[in-house]
Image (cartoon, grey):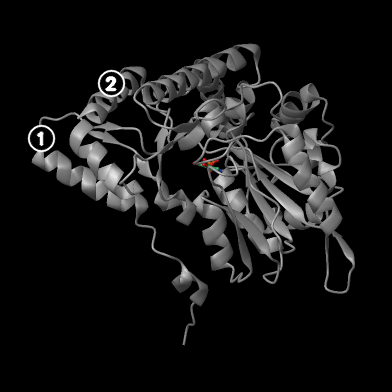
Amino acid sequence: MSYINENYLKLEDSYLFSTIAKKVAKYQEENPYKKIIKLGIGDVTRPIVPSVVNAMQKACIEMGNKETFKGYGPEQGYDFLREKIVEFDYKKRKIQIDKDEIFVSDGAKCDTGNIVEIFDAANTVAITDPVYPVYLDTNIMAGRKNIVYLPLTEENNFVPQIPKEKVDIIYLCLPNNPTGTVLKKEELKVWVDYAKQNNSIILFDSAYESFITEEDVPHSIYEIDGAKDVAIEFRSFSKTAGFTGIRCAYAVVPKTLKGYTKNGKQVSINALWNRRQCTKFNGVAYITQKGAEAIYSNEGQKEIKENIKYYLENAKIIREGLQNSGFTVYGGKNAPYIWLKVPKGHTSWSFFDDLLEKAGVVGTPGAGFGKCGEGYFRLTAFGDRENTIEAIQRIELASRQ
Ligand code: PLP
């Protein structure tokens, strides 16, 4: 008999994007000449920048040459990339991170999902609601029962609040998907202090860090004193440099970060994660890492920043357009996500249907991100400019009907 991991049966079916796809397909069938504008899924639309393309082409040639061919690389990532990350993403912000605290990977989705396995299932985990669904589902798969939800609501300005019960592991995603919220330094410090007092660990997902525009918003949790003793940071090249189809990310696991055995013995989390990666992961492709390295060149920086500026301009168009039409809107200033309150009388799904029907625009119902997402709706700034402008004009028109 082959017994399965029954925790998988406890997962709620993720109908969100498949339901959206079905509804959109049905609408298109009924309205074959109508152009549908999709501002729902969080994938980029701008192509890979020339610096990255050139670097990857060069790396391809190297792979085809006997003298420069590479086989298996280091599981933790090549030094040339880890050094650039240390220099540009941390040292420039006056944060001291060592090269061996950086673990290059094929995605923040994998990292935030895989990290679960180095922690005991008995830990109590705090997860925001609404949330990027990977955190919750991977904890359920691991059999974790103690999950505390941190509601993100209009009343708390979508800022996660310290829970009444003690929690051991805390997921924070900032800038936030789906609400687009960021935390100021003092607000993030509250969590670092909590983690220190309670020997908790913060899993800090900053996949959208490059969209931060405001001065007093930390780009890294390590900008907060003492955070290296309590936090793992996850970063991704997906949204920063359009790598959603190339796949490259990294996790920062400080050497000062400790977990505990049941007997109270301290264990290095960096050593555990290194062991996990070396056993289960064979590193990211050389060609990919060469592409990622290129974004740190002067030209690469200029090119990727242009793209981010483009998406942020889309976000502004969406935010301001909706506000002019009378919507209450959050996010979109330091994030590619706009979180809008659905009009009175609507649920997030009925608003989805209404918007599709009246405007031919597709977004994501907030209820798909958790109970507290009900009553809200997510639009993304990753579309192209023309479509974004047209979508907002259509929503403005529809809202007057
Ligand atoms: N973390 C958050 C909060 C995300 O929204 C996403 C993607 O949408 C990811 C991680 C996934 O990143 P990656 O493409 O590096 O796997």
Q: Is residue 64 visible?
A: no
Q: Position of residue 338 (x, y in %)?
A: 45, 32
- Residue at left offset 63%, top offset 50%: 282
Query: At label 2, which amino acid type do we have?
Result: Gln
Give whichever of 338, 110 is nearer the camera.
338
Judged from the image, the secondary structure of the residue bearing numbered disc 1 is loop
Q: Position of residue 256 (x, y in %)?
A: 87, 48
- Residue at left offset 54%, top offset 25%: 333
Q: Position of residue 63 (x, y in %)?
A: 56, 31
Residue 35 quadrant: top left
Residue that badge 1 annotates: 32
- The image shows residue 283, relative to residue 35, as above or below, that is below
Q: Is residue 12 visible?
A: yes
**Numbered label attached to residue 203:** none
Residue that badge 2 annotates: 393
Of mark 2 and mark 1, the one earlier in the sequence is 1
Asked if residue 335 lies left or right of residue 373, the reply is: right
Total marks shown come to: 2
Contact between labelled residues 1 and 2, with CB atoms less than 8 Å apart: no
Query: At label 1, which amino acid type do we have?
Result: Pro
Q: Position of residue 354 (x, y in %)?
A: 23, 41
Task: For ligand 1, tell me if the residue under mark 2 lies within 8 Å.
Answer: no
Task: For ligand 1, tell me if the residue under mark 1 lies within 8 Å.
Answer: no
Judged from the image, the secondary structure of the residue bearing numbered disc 2 is helix
- The image shows residue 76, relative to residue 303, as above or below, that is below
Q: Would you call the spot at circle 1 few (<14 residues within 10 Å), some (14-19), or many (20 or more)?
A: few
Please identify the residue farthest to the right as the structure is shown: 265
Residue 120 quadrant: bottom right
Q: Nearer the viewer, mark 2 or mark 1?
A: 2
Asked if residue 241 lies left or right of residue 117, the reply is: left
Give whichever of 398, 108 is nearer the camera.
398
